[in-house]
Image (cartoon, helix red, strand yellow):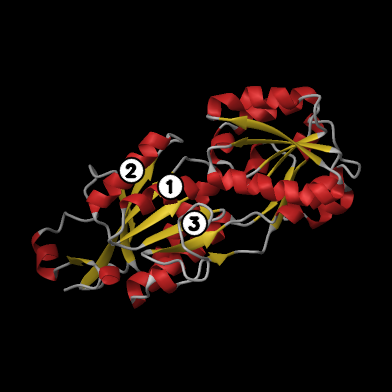
Amino acid sequence: MKHLFSVRTRVFVLALSLLLLPGCGGSDPASTQDNGATSSADEQHAEAYAISISQIVEHPSLDAMRQGFKDRFAQQGVSATFTDHIAQGDMAINAQIGKQIKGEAPDLVLAITTPSAQAVVQAVDDRPVVFTGVTDPVSARIVESLERPGANVTGMTDMSPMDQHVALIREFLPELEKLGVIYNAGETNSVVLVDALKQECSPLGIEVVEATIDNSSGVFQAAKSLVGRCEAVYIPLDNTVVSALESAIKVCEESDLPLFSGDTDSVARGTVAAVAVDYYKMGVQTADIALRILEQGQDPAVMPVETIRDVVLHVNQRAAANMGIAIPEKMLLRAAKVID
């Protein structure tokens, strides 16, 4: 009987078949759902893991985590096929994906973001689940504790360094009194982040002005509602808002209202600045967790949830000018990336 966390799909590559079929090579081009990282073709046989991936929505930070995860398998010479499922921000589809993955019976599941992890954990209890990009897995009821996750689940948290986010905004606006925030109150991760934002702002005498949404179509109106009510706007790691980020950018540019984000990929899209983790590196580190489960048979239940505390600063000079603010010279000098 195979161990629950060491199940493998064996793919035998026979030299005789290669001789008989010299014109055949690679995978079936008609199969577009699975894409894999494979080890050396010179091996007589390879062991391929089947990995199902659930992601709530496509945007650069989440895509970077997914790519980093896949690339790490290739870097380590571990063969795997990946089946990607993207819910496009639809919670009903997100729940369906969890059930679909249950039926796929993969060797391991990767869940990217809090909503995806919640849906997968509810549906899959008979094989390892590794999550990444989850803000507070305890509050989201994904794990029992960060030290001992329990059951079949472990992964990585991307809890924002909110103290650094507020400090960054105050470098631009030292006299800041009111900070707007747009978020989906239905996303547990966003609620946790906004609570953390309030805790950081309160001792500094900064009022947090909230604008909540139910779906991405509400982002434009939420941003409009903040005009004249605050001196800057902050968007946390909210999957719904980030998926419609351009709507908020448009409003803020028209209103000279500086817009800051909780992820650096949003800076490239048009926010003024952000300090955040490198999400590609987070994907790589998440893959290392998965490989310890698959290759070494480690038990997710007792593998502590990991984090990346090193952050990088990205600034966007064009966005700053469009929103009526200047980037301090010392900030330009220390930024890891400056977008002109």
Whether tag 2 and tag 1 are in contact, CB under 8 A, the answer is: yes
* Residue 297, visible in the rendered structure: yes
- In terms of secondary structure, where does tag 3 sit? strand
Judge from the rendering whether residue 286 lies leftward or rightward of residue 163; answer left or right: left
Q: Position of residue 290 (x, y in %)?
A: 40, 66
Tag 3: amino acid? Thr
Quarter of the C terminus within the rendering? top right
- In terms of secondary structure, where does tag 2 sit? helix
Pick the front one: 330 or 151: 151
User: For mark 1, what is the residue?
Assistant: 116
User: For mark 3, what is the residue?
Assistant: 132
Splitting the image into 4 quarters, where does residue 72 fall? bottom left
Of the image marks 3 and 1, the number of the one nearer the N terminus = 1
User: For mark 2, what is the residue?
Assistant: 97
Pick the front one: 301 or 157: 301
Q: Residue at x 42, y 53 (%)?
A: 111
Tag 2: amino acid? Ile
How packed mark 3 is, by other alpha carbons closer than 10 Å (few <14, some 14-19, many 20 or more), is: many
